[in-house]
Image: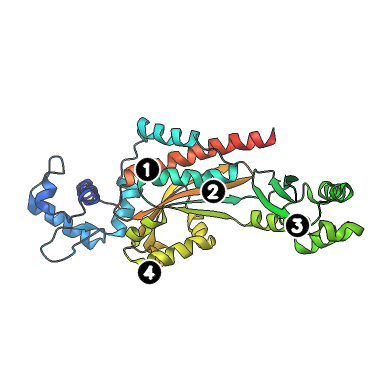
Amino acid sequence: MELSLRKQAVLKAIIKAYIETGEPIGSKNLTALIENAPSSATLRNEMSELCELGLLCQPHTSAGRIPTNNGYRLYVDSLMSHNPLEDYEKDVIDSALKELNCEPEGIPAAAAQILSRQTKLPVIACLITKRPPKIKKVELFPIGKNSAMLLVITDDGRTRSRVFRYTNEPTLEQRECFKRLVDTRIKQKTVDQLNLGYMQSVIAEAGIYSLDVMPLLTAVLGCAAEIEESGITLRNENALYNVCGDEAKAQKLISLIKQGDPIISLLEGIKDNVGAVFGTDTGYSELEKGTIIAAKFSLADKYKGYIAVIGPNRMSYEKIIPATEYTAKRLTEIMTEAQKDMED
């Protein structure tokens, strides 16, 4: 949509003022917001034409104008100033990220918590494996007289564990049988290969020790199934009530997010490293009053992901977009370093 420079200035000024105040903007107020502003009558004409174009609307007769979803979209795509994040804001994010002490899989969720604190809005983090991860290690650690912990680690740093209580402590022969099966039948297999049929054949191979190793191998199967699921995390979900403006819609949106695939499908539609998805474009009534600002992070051929802020249409795009983009950039760097540590 081509707009004259004056219309661009009017639309931009109204959106910025409305984001800041939440009040409809009239022509008299607008004269103070535009450099070398024309007369109030001229501004009223421009505002009326922007209404006809579907970029502004008038809440009620005699009120000023407010942006429509189309107006916000044009603002984000074409009119908004794309300023880099301030150094002090980068330092806040960097300091918080440096304090992270978790496995690579947990880093996006922790970063979502950090970004949520910065924006005061709910944040989604999702990790999508580009290929099924392979089993790197399966270890059994005694943690008590009659208990042990099974730990499964993949080549991309994901971990799952199970704790067992024994009636009788495994014998040396039983432990050696389990270790042999892990080394020959489980390590280097992708998590999707460790299905029920395959694991039954592994158990059968244990021969006289089948009943003894069955609980351990069943636990490996359960861990692999959990790892295979795509991970999506929501932080500061209570703030969704303000975004949706309705408790029932907020609960529906939380359920939609936890399903994973619908939200991931929306995020996959973002063409650039960072972008906006307006709720009215999604087909989900739960999002009709909201906008998703999302940025991508990735690690070569292992996985990719998104970190996304969910906010009302009336939010500070000029601050939230660069904060989201910078957090995703740092996520790529930090997870790349964590992956190298896993491989060393």
What residue occupies the far right of the structure in this picture? Answer: 208
Query: Residue beneath label 2, please?
Result: 305
x and y percent of residue 203 in the render?
A: 84, 59
Residue 137 at least partly seen:
no
The quarter of the picture where residue 25 lies is bottom left
Q: Residues within 10 Å of mark 4 (few under 14, many from 20)?
A: few
Q: Identify the amino acid type marked 3.
A: Leu
The numbered dot on residue 194 is: 3
Q: Nearer the viewer, residue 181 or 245?
A: 181
Dot 3 or dot 2: first in sequence order is: 3
Could you tell me if the residues under marks 3 and 4 are in contact, i.e. CB atoms within 8 Å?
no
Query: Residue beneath label 4, please?
Result: 248
What SS does tag 3 mark?
loop
Q: Residues within 10 Å of mark 1 (few under 14, many from 20)?
A: some
Q: Nearer the viewer, residue 20 or 141?
A: 141
The alpha-carbon separation of the residues under discs 3 and 1 comes to 41 Å
Dot 3 or dot 1: first in sequence order is: 1
The alpha-carbon separation of the residues under discs 4 and 1 comes to 26 Å
Dot 2 or dot 1: first in sequence order is: 1
The numbered dot on residue 118 is: 1
The alpha-carbon separation of the residues under discs 3 and 4 comes to 40 Å
Dot 2 or dot 4: first in sequence order is: 4
Q: Nearer the viewer, mark 2 or mark 1?
A: 1
The alpha-carbon separation of the residues under discs 3 and 2 comes to 24 Å
Q: Is residue 340 above or below residue 297?
A: above
Residue 312 at least partly seen:
yes
The alpha-carbon separation of the residues under discs 2 and 1 comes to 20 Å
Dot 4 or dot 1: first in sequence order is: 1
